[in-house]
């Protein structure tokens, strides 16, 4: 019986707040003095914001914990240091690499390959994706083909790339291009399709012609999403680096990792992986910064 | 049906519209004249094609057969004389409020053959629209800093900037709260008087349709067609009190009843009673 009351009471209650005058109600008047409700920790409430301080503390914990686990394993886990070097050994190796065996040159050539492959990909994918996302005819013509190719493993193209392009810089850049381009086209097309129809149609009823629709509405409207797409695909370009440097390379971070594997230098492998991770983290942050600067209306407070 | 004076602004004759692969006509036998400077509102149950008809007048949809003339010319795609205001998501978030309102000045269609006095007039018009809409203080704000009501003011000002002969409004206040909506009603009536534009206004809110319209066109669904055209007898001078006048309420009731009939939706109260009775027994048992 009591449960039926629980159900009916809120129905009559619901009408009351509408009658009450809107405005701040003094908390002292609203509720009798009673022990303050116990506050649950906010950080496990769904989608609740957390303080800046809490964010940085948690981020530090998230980054340092694996490092500590790794250090503990290396020190007390009874692992052979040949297979699991300690963090200190990796740092020492990285330092040695940087000072004596050309880490900067390796990083430089790798950055060159990744950025070039990425840029060529972007220069073609942006206009192509824009056309696919804007015109149904271009979409019908190109999207199924792109969908088909993007499932092909980039690694499998290595023999062909070597046959067609040779074994110099071009082939490494080509692998990175193949790995990123097809995904990028589809993501750009999707970004463009997400431009709200009302934005385009409003411009049409203000007399915009086709060129103006693309230049003054679709492109500026999609731009924030496009920069995000570039940021994400840049990450993918880096993941193809090691694959690209499988092709007759004699320098580069990926090459160094592959060579270290041959000589069982796990400390170099760790150092190489971490350097790639750091470069990735840095580019990602640069993209985010550029996003904030270029699209201020997306970051308004309050 | 009364025949509006001189030449109609919009003439629709036997207009049909069927979407690709659809079994029913989205619109059929649509015939209607809309006079210059008229304020016509369209209501009807969902699926009656009122938005489709509005979009067809705007040139955003093509019709399958029949005749659609604006100023005596067949409609062939959208143009600067028929500006549309949407329910939402139509403002350009990368432009400030002022830039949004001046958007059409960036378009070739508005700047062809312009003289320096035109430019001056245009900048004066932008300022006037900002004032008219109560947006002076927000000129340099981003649209997403504004409330829904203020955003719609920007959308209306932007549509008016190019001096369109016809303003097409697709449930422009549908997403606003009741109080904001009342303010917008009086604002849009004021704008209509001032701008001498023909307004075609689609809404699902019957009260809004009567309060704003000189005529209310009721459309019926499946297939979409014009059911009844009501002349609204309350003249030009209207205020919020009118919404409580007996004649107003009677007309509102008549239109609401007719919409329910056309939609084939009679709420079966007895059935509801039985259902809620069952619900109560259920929860008592629990």
Image: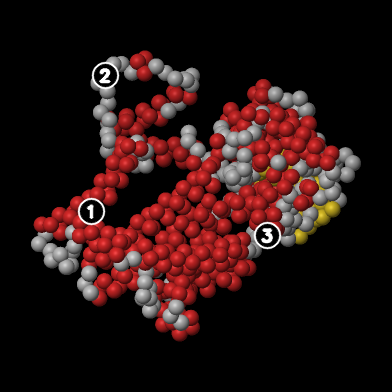
The tag earlier along the polypeptide, 2 or 1, is: 2
Residue A41 left/right relative to A207: left
Are tags 2 and 1 found on a single chain?
Answer: yes
> In x, y percent, where is residue A113?
44, 68
Q: Do tag 3 and tag 1 residues touch (Cβ < 8 Å)?
A: no
Residue receiving disc 1: A66
Instruction: Quadrant for the N terminus of chain A, please.
Output: top left
Chain hosting mark 2: A
Task: Decide if residue B57 is in sight here.
Answer: no
Residue receiving disc 3: B18
Which label belongs to residue A34? Answer: 2
Which label belongs to residue A28? Answer: none
> In x, y percent, where is residue A203?
68, 49
Q: CA distance from mark 2 to mark 1?
A: 45 Å
Chain hosting mark 3: B
Q: CA distance from mark 3 to mark 2?
A: 66 Å
């Amino acid at each position: 019986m009591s449960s039926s009351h629980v159900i009916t009471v809120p129905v009559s209650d619901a009408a009351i707040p509408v009658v009450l005058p809107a405005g701040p109600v003094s908390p002292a008047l609203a509720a009798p003095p009673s022990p303050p409700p116990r506050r649950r920790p906010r950080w496990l409430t769904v989608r609740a914001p957390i303080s800046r301080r809490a964010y940085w503390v948690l981020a530090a914990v998230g980054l340092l914990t694996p490092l500590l686990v790794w250090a503990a394993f290396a020190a007390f886990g009874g692992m052979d240091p040949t297979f699991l070097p300690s963090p200190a050994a990796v740092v020492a190796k990285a330092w040695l690499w940087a000072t004596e065996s050309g880490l900067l040159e390796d990083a430089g050539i790798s950055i060159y390959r990744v950025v070039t492959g990425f840029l060529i990909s972007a220069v073609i994918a942006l206009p192509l994706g824009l056309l696919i996302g804007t015109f149904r005819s271009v979409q019908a013509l190109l999207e199924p083909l792109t969908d088909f190719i993007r499932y092909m493993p980039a690694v499998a193209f290595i023999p062909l790339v070597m046959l067609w392009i040779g074994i110099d810089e071009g082939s490494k850049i080509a692998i990175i291009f193949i790995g990123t381009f097809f995904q990028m086209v589809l993501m750009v097309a999707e970004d463009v399709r997400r431009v709200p129809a009302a934005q385009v149609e409003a411009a049409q009823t203000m007399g915009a012609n086709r060129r103006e629709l693309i230049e003054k509405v679709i492109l500026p409207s999609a731009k924030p999403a496009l920069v995000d797409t570039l940021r994400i695909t840049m990450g993918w370009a880096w993941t193809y680096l090691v694959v690209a440097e499988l092709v007759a390379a004699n320098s580069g971070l990926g090459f160094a990792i592959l060579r270290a594997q041959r000589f069982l230098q796990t400390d170099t492998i760790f150092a190489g992986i971490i350097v790639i991770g750091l470069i990735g983290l840095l580019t990602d942050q640069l993209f985010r910064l550029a996003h904030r600067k270029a699209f201020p209306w997306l970051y308004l407070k309050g | 049906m009364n025949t509006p004076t001189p030449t109609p602004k919009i003439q629709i004759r036997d207009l049909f519209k069927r979407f690709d692969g659809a079994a029913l006509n989205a619109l059929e036998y649509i015939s209607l004249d809309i006079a210059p400077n008229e304020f016509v509102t369209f209501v009807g149950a969902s699926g009656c094609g009122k938005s489709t008809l509005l979009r067809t007048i705007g040139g955003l949809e093509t019709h399958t057969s029949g005749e659609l003339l604006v100023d005596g010319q067949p409609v062939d795609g959208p143009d600067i004389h028929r500006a549309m205001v949407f329910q939402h998501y139509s403002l350009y978030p990368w432009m400030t409020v002022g830039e949004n309102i001046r958007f059409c000045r960036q378009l070739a269609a508005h700047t062809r053959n312009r003289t320096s006095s035109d430019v001056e007039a245009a900048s004066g018009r932008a300022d006037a629209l900002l004032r008219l809409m109560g947006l002076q203080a927000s000129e340099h704000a981003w649209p997403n800093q504004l409330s829904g009501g203020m955003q719609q003011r920007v959308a209306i000002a932007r549509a008016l900037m190019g001096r369109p002969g016809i303003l097409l409004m697709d449930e422009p206040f549908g997403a606003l709260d009741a109080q904001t909506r009342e303010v917008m009603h009086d604002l849009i009536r004021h704008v209509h008087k001032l701008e001498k534009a023909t307004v075609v206004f689609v809404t699902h809110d019957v009260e809004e349709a009567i309060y704003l319209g000189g005529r209310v066109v009721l459309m019926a669904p499946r297939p979409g067609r014009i059911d009844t055209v009501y002349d609204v007898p309350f003249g030009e001078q209207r205020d919020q009190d009118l919404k409580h006048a007996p004649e107003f309420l009677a007309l509102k009731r008549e239109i609401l009843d007719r919409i329910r009939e056309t939609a084939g939706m009679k709420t079966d109260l007895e059935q509801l009673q039985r259902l809620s009775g069952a619900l109560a027994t259920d929860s008592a048992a629990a």
